[in-house]
Image (cartoon, helix red, strand yellow):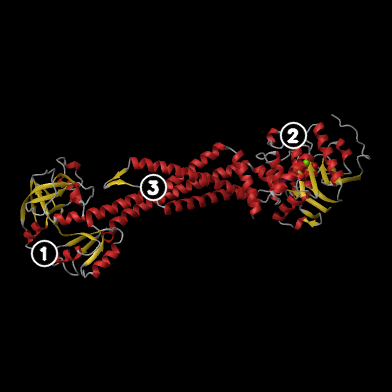
Amino acid sequence: MFEESKVAFFLAKRSIVRGNKGTLYLTILIIGMVFVNLIFLPSIISGVAVLFNQQTIDYSYGNLVIEPKENQVYIKSADELQRKIERIPGVTGVSPQYVSGTTIVYKGNEVTPLLYAINPDDDRRVLKIATKVASGEYLADGDTDQIVIGYRLAGNYDERQDVIPSLGGVDVGKVVEVTYNNGVTRQYRIKGIINSDSYDVDSNAFITKNEYESVYGFENQANQMLVRTEETGNEDAMRTTLMAFGVQEKIWTWEEKSANFLNQIIGSFNIINFIGTVVSLVIAIVVIFIVIFINTVYRRKQIGILKAIGIDRSIIIRSYLFQALFIFALGTVIGFGFLAVILQLLAANPIVFPGGPVAPVVDAMLIFRSMVSLLVVSLIAGYVPAWLTTREDILTAIRG
Amino acid sequence: MIIGTDLKRYYGLGAVQVRALDGVSLKIQKGEFVGVMGPSGSGKSTLLHMLGLLDRPTSGSLLIDGVDVGALDEQARTVFRLRRLGYVFQDYALVPELTARENVYLPSMARGMTPQECTLVCTDILGVVGLGDRIHHLPSQMSGGEQQRVAIARALVNRPALLLADEPCANLDTRNSKVILDLFRKLNHDLHQTIVMVSHEEWHKQYFDRIISMKDGLIETDIQGGPEGASGGEPSG
Ligand SMILES: Nc1ncnc2c1ncn2[C@@H]1O[C@H](COP(=O)(O)OP(=O)(O)O)[C@@H](O)[C@H]1O
Ligand SMILES: [Mg+2]
């Protein structure tokens, strides 16, 4: 076994050293590229997922979302619940809010966005919307006659540039008319316009919780309560803690709330990713197969001679496996080199998605998986042609 | 050493069947230097392929060194070739990617010798064939005579029981042919190396102990003789 490998290694080494260098370098280069391809796209997709997740936490849900008990529309005694949760270790902010449909009219443009009624100070402790004011200012706790809207909702004078039905390019300081679904209509001055890169946020409108309660005659209630925790990632544990502290309302994690949306996106990405991976591996298998096959066919006579002088077929096959391994190993090293350069370039000039720059996520598992699949592919692509060519009988091979 | 009984090798089927060997029986003793002669197409190479385990007879039995080689599977035949046979081809058949030394080194390495042993026997055998200083050259950088001497060294490195050579001098000029033939005679005399060599050059006869003449796939004559008994003479042209 070991002896055979020694002979095979000796033959492979000589073949590489004395064989055609150009083909060898080209093959190694291609395998390097395939390796980059196997890693790069998935790392970007992971990066996008990380970005989207962070956005969901920062602009939509915080870490946990508390909803009314079964069969109830509102959380009762919201202030008490808020204070209770705020005291729980690990919680850094709690933001009670109302969410409802509404109609906003400006100069004949009518839109029906979601209206969020918030306590601005609480909101700042949970979400980052307040940091994304494109013009004007964010709401303050005492505001009653002011409204903040997303830039998509504000829209453009040129309707064709709008992505959603808009107010036709309303500016800060203008007055819009808001009609609630209980029939009350009030006038508000636009205090600020938000551009957060989060599609939802930029399509919504925001007023203070106090104003909303005065319209509906509510007090001390909420539709939902967003909770921010110190750490992201241990939402399940935090939910248990909240329940242990006596929270009886329904508690969701941000992942649960956004499951559908995210799963759809990741699902589609995974399909793209899968196709990319398969194509890369097929390229690798074809290239190595062709190179080894041409190599063996070109050395037909030599293979016949080796068999004639008593070198076992399995040794000859193994020598081509060693060559395939060599191509794989060097290709992977070159691939790592390329990848390092690409990641450097990306760090300097990041790809910017809606929501911010994407940092590729290259984890050990991904590298390991890529290397293993490329290794398997290399071995198959080395074995099959060697097996085929060495099958020929000695005299036919020697005659050439 | 060799006992072949009614060896046949037919190519093709039916009307176009070629009887390359048509029932050859022969016995060769250890230490003999046998020349196989005869016109082109008479079946000399086919016979040598049988003896060299490069091909299997259509029928007939063959014992070499006490082993019924027909009963061996491919892998066992490969091992047999490696350990007990040395084969010299007309066109040298060296591995072009290996230097002279590496070509010789390979069979000894495959046999499982340690690197030190390999180096020792290679240096030794390359000295015997008279290639002391050109051992680090690739076959493409050597003359035909040198290449054939490398091929002979390769065939001998594992101390084979039987050395087979199929027209080893066909591509060489007279001077180089004489070097090879003298080498064979020396191996035969000094080491009692059993040699079966195919040739169709009349003047080679003087080197053989015994001459088997073939015709149409059959042995026509089988004459014991020696360098003394052969008609001999200088090569013509
Ligand atoms: N692979 C083959 N297929 C068909 N016929 C063959 C093959 N090899 C040899 N022959 C035929 O067998 C006969 C003997 O060939 P060979 O042993 O090479 O002759 P020699 O070596 O004496 O010149 C010839 O007629 C040759 O044409
Ligand atoms: Mg012949």
Residue depicted at x 89% and y 46%: B222
Disc 1 versus disc 3: nearer the observer = 1
Q: Name the residue under label 2.
A: B144
Cβ of mark 3 under 8 Å from ligand 1: the answer is no
Considering depth in this image, is A338 or B60 the residue closer to the camera? A338
Residue depicted at x 15% and y 55%: A121
Any part of residue A133 in sight:
yes
How far apart are the alpha carbons under marks 1 and 3?
49 Å
Q: Mark 3 points at which residue?
A: A41
In which quadrant will I find the N terminus of chain A?
bottom right
Residue depicted at x 27% and y 64%: A238
Disc 1 versus disc 2: nearer the observer = 1
Considering depth in this image, is B140 or B206 the residue closer to the camera? B140
The spot of residue A391 in percent (x, y) is 64, 50
Q: Residue A321 vs residue A373: left or right?
A: right
How far apart are the alpha carbons under marks 1 and 2?
105 Å
Residue A261 figure quarter = bottom left
Judging from the image, what secondary structure is the residue with disc 2 in? helix
Cβ of mark 1 under 8 Å from ligand 1: the answer is no
Classed neighbour count for the residue bearing mark 2: other residues with Cα under 10 Å, few (<14), some (14–19), many (≥20): some
Residue A89 figure quarter = bottom left
Q: What residue type is labelled 2?
A: Gly
Considering depth in this image, is A29 or B17 the residue closer to the camera? A29
Residue furthest out toward the right: B229
Any part of residue A391 in sight:
no
Judging from the image, what secondary structure is the residue with disc 3 in? helix
Subunit of label 2: B
Subunit of label 1: A
Q: Which amino acid does label 3 sit on?
A: Leu
The spot of residue A13 in percent (x, y) is 61, 44
In which quadrant will I find the C terminus of chain A?
top right
Q: Mark 1 points at which residue?
A: A220
